[in-house]
Image (cartoon, grey):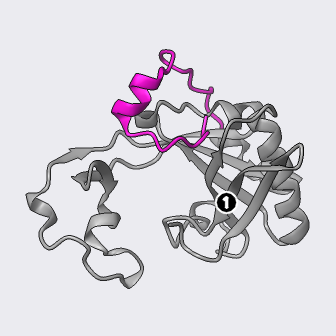
Amino acid sequence: MPMPPLVKVGVWERGKFIGCVLFARGASPHLGRPYGLTPFEVCELVRIALTKHETPVSRIVAIAIKFLRKNSPNLRLIVSFADTRQGHHGGIYQAGNWIYAGRSAVCREFYHEGRWKHNREVSGGAFGGSRRVADPSKLPQRKSEGKYRYLLPLDKDMRLRLEHLALPYPKRSEPITRDKQAMAGSTGTAEG
C-alpha cells in the first residue's frame, strides 16, 4: 500500500462504483527534491484501479486531478510512473499532456510470494519498517529497467521550470495481450 497520506478518488459510471484513483506521497520521501519542492507541494499518482468501464482512463484521471487540485491548493506537481514490465508506456499521461522526463533509476527486484517486488517490499528498509523476508539474498533477483517518469506541473511557473526536462514520448513497443499481462504479473490496473 502507498505511504500515507492518501487521497482516494472514487470513480462511478451510471451510478455504479467502478474503481478509484489514488494519490499519495509516493515511495520516496524526497519525491519533490529534484524539482525544488517540499513534500507538501508534490504528490505521486500511485494507482489507477478500474473494473470494466466506458469512460477513457485519461478522462477519469483528469477528473480525479481536478478534484485533487481543488482540495490541495498548495500542490504544484504530480509525478507518476509507467511500468514497462507491466506493459505500460504512459499513454494516459501522454493523452493528458504530462511531461515525459526519462526513466527512473534501476533497482533490484526480488521474486517473492508469486511476484516480482521492489527491494523495499522485501527488506522493509523503507520508512523504518521491519524486515519482511528473513534473507532477501536467497530470493531470485533481477535488475529493473527503470519506469517511465511523467510529470504534471499544476501551475504555469512550474511548467516553465520543468519544460527543459521534456523528452519525446515513448511508444508502446508491441500490443499487450492478456497472456502477456499474466506473464508480467499485471494487477489489472490501468496505468497506460
Q: Which residue is mark 1?
A: 22
Q: Is residue 181 above or below residue 73?
A: above
* Residue at 69%, 38% in the rendered image: 93
Q: Nearer the viewer, residue 175 or 158?
A: 175
Q: Is residue 73 visible?
A: no
Q: Is residue 89 above or below residue 191?
A: above
Location of residue 119 in the rendering, given as x and y in whole percent from the top left corner = 29, 61
Location of residue 121 in the rendering, given as x and y in whole percent from the top left corner = 34, 65
Q: Is residue 35 above or below residue 60?
A: below
Q: Name the image quarter holding residue 89.
A: top right
State yes or no: residue 181 in magenta.
yes
- Residue type at mark 1: give it: Leu
* Residue at 45%, 39% in the rendered image: 186
Residue that sits furthest to the top in the current view: 174
* Residue at 49%, 21% in the rendered image: 176
Location of residue 100 in the rendering, given as x and y in whole percent from the top left corner = 63, 37
Give the side of residue 105 with respect to residue 56, left or right: left
Q: Which residues are magenta?
A: 166-192
Q: Nearer the viewer, residue 158 or 132?
A: 132
Give the side of residue 34 with respect to residue 61, left or right: left
Q: Is residue 63 above or below residue 71?
A: above
State yes or no: residue 152 in magenta.
no
Q: Main secondary structure of the magenta part?
A: loop
Location of residue 120 in the rendering, given as x and y in whole percent from the top left corner = 34, 66
* Residue at 64%, 49% in the rendered image: 48
